[in-house]
Amino acid sequence: MIREIAGALVDIGRGSTYTDAARRVRMQATFSTSGKPARELKNGQTVAEWMADFVPVVSAPHAQNSWPDVLVLDSVPFWWRGVGDLKTKVPLYSVLAAYGYDASGKNGRLWKLEAYPTQTVAAWSEFFARLPGVPVSIVADEDIAIRGAVIARWGSDFWMERYHSCEYHLHASGSQLLSRSSGTSELSGMFRNALTSKEAWNTFETAVRNTGPLAMQTWVRIHGDQIRRQTERRATIPPVYANGALENSLNRVRTIIGDRAFSFRNRARLNLLLELVRLGLLRADNASDYATSIRAHLIAHQGHPKRSYRDIYDHQSNEEGTNINSLWSPAAQLKIKPGPDQEPVDSISLES
């Protein structure tokens, strides 16, 4: 059965639903002497139990022990829209993500994926607290929540000295503003390299303040201080200036969760799935390696390791009626309360 467990975990990390993974195992299961499958899997319940018990086991060889020298940050939110009312839009949860590089700006890899009910300073602070270490530089969009959490963890001086706003998004937003205004071709030419050196930025900023359109002057006022700081130190930090690699990883997360976003209601369970997705993006999702790790784990515990799946059930509620361990944001829990004929929030029929 070890091979079937390993294969199911690989399938889940590549986007299969729990139910589909269970059906695959059922088809591949070894037959007993009676000619019947050794264990009949009707839905994803058993696969969910395997995830709780064995995802930490297969991911252990690829665990990160501290934050990298270059830490790249981004997130992706997931939303719920009311049936028959497209104007009703409620945030369900967000997946926070980190990508890492070494001090030379090379050997990039997906570092961490974790789901949170809200995308706030508190969420990012909890995310940063997962690992020790002090990065040489941090690359992210100008996100207020990220900024607040970075300052809370490493201090305001760290933010001023080591934060690098993603140049791709700065350039995209600035170029878009310029393209909307007539007579800005000369400014567009200056802006092409304005984010790469202090001299180029000063030239562009002066030109905008003198003759630039009002919208671009406002943009410069908003971003100018940050750009000035990072162009002055750009040559002294590792050559990672944008978060594009992490965006590619989050696109994969978005695809796998996709239309099933509503089905993921338990934070611990989704984080196990995200860890399998991370292993897949690292190209470390090898069924043979998974089986080796699982077999060693079982042998170390004489075939009877502690079962973990009950530890992540979510049945506790606070005074407001929201499930305190649920993945959904409080707003979503209150807005989408199940009726008497609906499944409870912790239902694990696991069509997802």
Image (tube, rainbow, N blue to C red):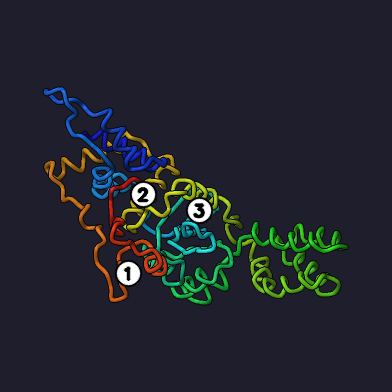
Tell me the amino acid under the disc marked 1: Thr
Residue at the right extreme of this rendering: 183
The numbered disc on residue 322 is: 1
Q: In percent of the image, x 52 and y 56: which residue is there?
A: 103
Q: Nearer the viewer, residue 20 or 170?
A: 20
For mark 2, does the 10 Å Cα neighbourhood hold few (<14), some (14 to 19), or many (20 or more) residues? many
Q: Amino acid at mark 2?
A: Leu
Whole-percent x and y of residue 256? Answer: 45, 46
Mark drawn on residue 101:
3
Query: Residue 288, percent across and down?
Result: 31, 33
Q: Is residue 127 left or right of residue 194?
A: left
Alpha-carbon span between mark 3 and mark 1: 39 Å
Label 2 or label 1, whichever comes before in sequence order: 2
Q: Nearer the viewer, mark 3 or mark 1?
A: 1
Q: Is residue 145 left or right of residue 207?
A: left
Circle 2 residue: 273
Can you give x and y, in whole percent of width and height, for residue 110 in the image?
Answer: 46, 50
Q: Nearer the viewer, residue 329 or 164?
A: 329
Amino acid type of the residue tagged 3 in the rendering: Tyr
Location of the N terminus by quadrant is top left
Instruction: For label 3, count other residues whose C-alpha is less than 10 Å away and answer few (under 14), some (14-19) or many (20+).
Output: many
Q: Splitting the image into 4 quarters, where does residue 267 fall?
A: bottom left
Secondary element under disc 1, as helix, strand or loop, is loop
Taking 232 as reference, is 249 left or right? left
Labels in figure, total: 3
